[in-house]
Amino acid sequence: MLRILVFKRRTMYIVLAILAVIAIGAFLFSAMTGSDETFSETMKYAYKKISPEQAKVLIEKNPELVIFDVRSEKNYNIGHLPCALQVTEKELKKNLSYYEKDSIYMIYGDDNKGSEKAAETMASKGFSRIYMLNGGLEYWPYELE
């Protein structure tokens, strides 16, 4: 009977050791892969890539959020996020002085290419609260206007 208790205790220790190794491995993996925060060329400012689910929460919880759609006007007219402003990257760059640097901005396009350029431009000009819809509107599962 004593041998059975020792075996069960030993098994418990083995299971706990395996779980600890898995937990440490998961922690190290997440630390090594980094965050979705991407730094601009100056390494002074950053923007954050967010999923459609995170973007939906951001939109719902921040009524002052400014949303930039950097797609073409034709694509914008087909469908866009609620309250999004259609602006080309060139127009955005030219009119940055009209926007508050401390406001919250979200940028999206057809894919990451155009929106990353716009986010980098804003970040390099001192805008500190910039979010980019990762993957673009293609991955947006919710309703459009």
Image (cartoon, rainbow, N blue to C red):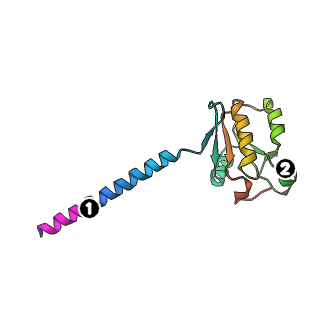
**Position of 86 relative to 139 (above/below):** above
Residue 64 visible: no
Q: Which residue is mark 2?
A: 72
Residue 115 sits inside the magenta stretch: no
- The CA distance from mark 1 to mark 2 is 61 Å
Q: Position of residue 72 (x, y in %)?
A: 84, 49
**Position of 135 relative to 68 (above/below):** below
Image quadrant for the N terminus? bottom left
State yes or no: discs 1 and 2 in contact (Cβ < 8 Å).
no
Q: Is residue 32 left or right of residue 95?
A: left
Which residue is rendered at x = 74% and y = 59% of the image? 143
Q: Please, what is the dominant secondary structure of the magenta stretch? A: helix
Q: Is residue 39 left or right of residue 32?
A: right
Image quadrant for the C terminus? bottom right
Mark with earlier residue (1, 2): 1
Q: Position of residue 71 (x, y in %)?
A: 81, 49
Q: Which residues are magenta?
A: 2-12
Q: Position of residue 36 (x, y in %)?
A: 59, 45
Q: Is residue 23 left or right of residue 117?
A: left
Task: Find residue 105 and report its image quarter.
Answer: top right
Name the mark on residue 82. Answer: none
Which residue is rendered at x = 48% and y = 45% of the image? 31
Q: Secondary structure at mark 2?
A: loop
Residue 4 visible: yes
**Position of 114 relative to 102 (above/below):** below
User: Considering depth in this image, is 28 or 64 the residue closer to the camera?
Assistant: 28
Name the mark on residue 12. Answer: 1
Q: Position of residue 3 (x, y in %)?
A: 13, 67
